[in-house]
Structures are given as C-alpha cells and as structure tokens.
Image (spheres, rainbow, N blue to C red):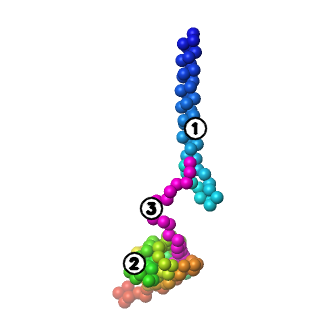
C-alpha cells in the first residue's frame, strides 16, 4: 500500500514539474512594453544587430495631368557624394513613394518614367530635399508626341 502511495506522489511531482517548466517557458517569452513605447520580447533587453535604421524619411506624391502616376522610379542621391544612390523605389497605384536614405541630410531626388506608355509618358525631373523638409510632391510634365506618334 505504501509503495502505491509513493509511486503516486512521484508521478504527481513529475506532472507538476512539467507544468511549472511549461509555464516558465510560456511566460518567459511574453512581450513587455518599455517606457520608450517599444515592445520587446523575452525576459530582458534584446541587443540590436545589423545596420541601424536610417534617420531620414522622404515621401510624397507624383502627379501628371493632375492625376497620380504609378510606376515612376524615384531615387535619392547624396548631394555631396555624386553618383551614390542611397535609396530607390517606385510609386504605388496612388502615385505615393517612400524613401529612407542614409547620408548627410541633403539629397537630390530624381523621378524617371520607366514604364513607357503604360501610364503615360512623362519627362524626368530632379528636385532637392534637405533634412527637415516636409513631403516632396512633384508634378511631371507629359512628353510631347513625336512626329511618328502623331501620324
């Protein structure tokens, strides 16, 4: 009789140990919101690895003929380091773009129509953007049809 009671307690201890271990595993990886507003996972601070997030953010809308233009190639180059493209993207269906360039805060932003006649043909344009400026909204001029296109 005592042997059965001893085996029952041993089994009960094993079950409780497994449940406690599972609880520590599950609750040890819960998210914690820090005072900075960031959510961190795990029991403590997590070191950051990789490239730091860029500190510049350039956005805006590209229009032509008073309508948004999708598919425009947009690139940002540092003004002081000519030739280095720091970020590029294409406009979405609403003509909106977002760039996150690295550099010293002064950029030449270039807008190029790369999709051909799909969304209309427009002339390329460049604009300067400095750190702290707001959205960079651009209106592109349509290309004039050539003699072959009018015939």
* Sequence-earlier tag: 2 or 3: 3
User: Depth-wise, is mark 2 or mark 3 nearer the camera?
Assistant: 3
* Sequence-earlier tag: 1 or 3: 1
In this view, 20 is above or below 103: above
**Real-space Cα distance between discs 2 and 3?**
21 Å
Would you name the residue on which mark 1 appears? 23
Would you name the residue on which mark 3 appears? 50
Would you name the residue on which mark 2 appears? 84
Callout 2: SS:
loop
Q: Is 139 positioned to the left or the right of 150 in the image? A: right
In this view, 31 is above or below 95: above
Question: Which secondary structure is most common in the magenta stretch?
Answer: loop
- Check if mark 2's residue and mark 1's residue have beta carbons within 8 Å: no
* Sequence-earlier tag: 2 or 1: 1
Q: Is residue 45 magenta?
A: yes
Residue at the image position 54 percent from the left and 18 percent from the top: 7
Within 10 angstroms of label 3, few (less than 14), some, or many (20 or more) residues?
few
Residue at the image position 49 percent from the left and 76 percent from the top: 69
**Real-space Cα distance between discs 2 and 1?**
52 Å
Q: Quadrant of residue 10?
A: top right
Q: Nearer the viewer, residue 7 or 144?
A: 7
Callout 3: SS:
loop
Q: How many marks overall?
A: 3
Residue at the image position 57 percent from the left and 34 percent from the top: 20
User: Depth-wise, is mark 2 or mark 1 nearer the camera?
Assistant: 1
Q: Position of residue 133 (x, y in %)?
A: 57, 80
Q: Is residue 54 magenta?
A: yes
């Amino acid at each position: 009789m005592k042997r059965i009671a001893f085996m029952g307690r041993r089994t009960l201890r094993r079950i409780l140990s497994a449940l406690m271990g599972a609880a520590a595993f599950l609750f040890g990886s819960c998210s914690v919101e820090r005072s900075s507003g960031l959510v961190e996972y795990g029991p403590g601070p997590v070191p950051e690895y990789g490239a730091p997030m860029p500190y510049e953010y350039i956005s805006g809308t590209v229009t032509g003929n008073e309508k948004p233009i999708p598919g425009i190639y947009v690139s940002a180059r540092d003004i002081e380091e000519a030739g280095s493209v720091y970020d590029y993207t294409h406009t979405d269906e609403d003509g909106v773009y977002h760039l996150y360039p690295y550099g010293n805060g002064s950029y030449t932003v270039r807008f190029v129509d790369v999709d051909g006649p799909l969304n209309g043909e427009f002339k390329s344009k460049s604009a300067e953007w400095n750190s702290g400026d707001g959205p960079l909204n651009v209106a592109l001029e349509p290309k004039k049809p050539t003699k072959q296109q009018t015939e």
